[in-house]
Image (tube, grey):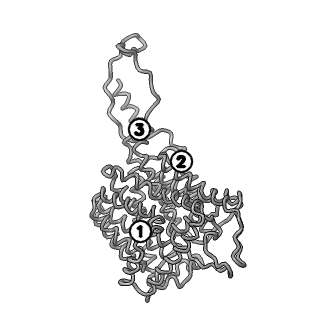
Amino acid sequence: MLALWSWVIVTVILFRVLRPAGALVACLLGAYLLLPTRTSFDLPLMPTLNKHSLPAIVATVMTATVAAGVQRPRPAGAEGAGRILPGWFPGNIWIRLLFLVAVLSVGLSALVNNDTLVYGPTVRRGLGPYDAGSMVLAMAVTLLPFLLGRKMLADETGRRVLLWGLCLSASAYAFLALFEVRMSPQLNMMVYGFRPSAWIQHLRGNGYRPLVFLEHGLRLGIFLTMATLVACGLSRIDRRRRIVCLLAAAWLFGTLVLSKNLGALAIGLLLVPVALFLSTRLQIVAAAVLAGTVLFYPLLRSADLIPVDQVVGLFEKYSSANRIGSLNYRLKNEDILLDKAMQRPALGWSTFARNRVFDPKTGRDISVTDGVWVIVIGESGLIGYMAQFGLLTVPILLLVRRPRQVEPSTALLALALVANLADMIPNSSLTPISWLIAGTLAGRLEQARAPAAATAGPPSDPPARNRPPRLRGGQAAEEEPPLPAMRATPYTRQTTLHSRSRRG
């Protein structure tokens, strides 16, 4: 609890020392990687304050303070200084609609699940307005990183800050991961005094699967995959640091291999060549194809259009018997959970384990929820699923409409996000970093319009036809040539003198 509440002070210091974009990335990334899991503080009528929600709330307060201190809009060409988008809600109509549905659908799901479920001795109570309000507030807090990324990281400067933050933090985190590969996953026990998950889940073959301070080793694996993709892409974006980025990519990929995360490694092997060799246009197209597949995965799975048998057969050739058994077990649980979700397809069964499958006689829970998609569709139905996964995928699908106008940094963030999305099919790896990247891409959709809107002044009355404008002495004023565009620099005495000299 001391570490959790100390992060409030850390966040304030970060926003006072660093620029807003860097402070935001450092705050959310640092909290995700360093704070303890399963440590929370509950208040009445408030969402649970933990390593995900508390840093986001404090970062929102600091961002609002920084945004309120901006006195004048930046010029249209001032990307180097970093720009804050106006407003808090997405400007794109589709993203705004998905955001509202994602927040409200969890409350509606609670309101329609007011019946009590009885499975032998196991009873799941009905939900009411109090639960609905609490869930709406919790979902709004969950989506705060999305809003922060959209507001603070939409321009090229913000996107590069996020990319370098992912690359550098993962490169440093790899040292801790390799320590646990050799010495066993014990850093969380050494620092915080408890294990976040069962010990047996981190035994793989003759070694260990590290997790450091994350909830599970699977989350560490996909984080390393995303960082590897980012390092590979940065080697093409930043030519001056090409060798450094390639070395970082090799370092991260080697750590990923040693971490014994087969699924994350497979995703990395699929997407690393895309980040290294394909053009920006083909990268965003590939990202959009994968994003669309994830968005419609439940429909494809229900229609038996996903080659499940072929995937299992591939695993049987190149994997161990334990991994094959784990995959078959997950697929079996997905089937029974999807069957129950389709009993209430619109808004689902809501929370408090109502979406799980219980034995009708003994009341024993006979299901295991692993993939994010099956959890969301079971709790919020198809409406909630399309809204939440729409926020994660629709920005990429909208960007692909004009692939030639997409910047390399945008395409690289899209690749990192779809790697995370692909891992959400078998695993529960939806994190604040996922929402932060998605919000950054959503802000990119607005940044083309925002500069013109920010710099446009109030309309002035046009001069009368065939009459030149006059000065106070009745003399006709000569038309002055337009002043050249000035760089985005702070308003100083030098710029004042320069403007006066130009005007005579």
Which mark is drawn over residue 305? 1
Q: Nearer the viewer, mark 2 or mark 1?
A: 1
Work out whether mark 3 precedes mark 1 in sequence or the reverse, and give the earlier one. 1
Residue 115: give x, y in percent of width and height.
Answer: 71, 65
Identity of the amino acid at label 3? Ala
Q: Is residue 185 visible?
A: yes
Splitting the image into 4 quarters, where does residue 423 fall? bottom left
Above-or-below relation of 166 to 454: below
Q: Disc 3 designates what residue?
A: 452
Q: In which quarter of the view is residue 179 placed?
A: bottom left
Q: CA distance from mark 2 to mark 1?
A: 39 Å
Q: Determine the residue positioned at 39% across, 35% down.
A: 495
Mark identifier at residue 88: 2
Amino acid marked by disc 2: Trp
Q: Quadrant of the N terminus?
A: bottom right
Observer-nearest of 503 and 157: 157
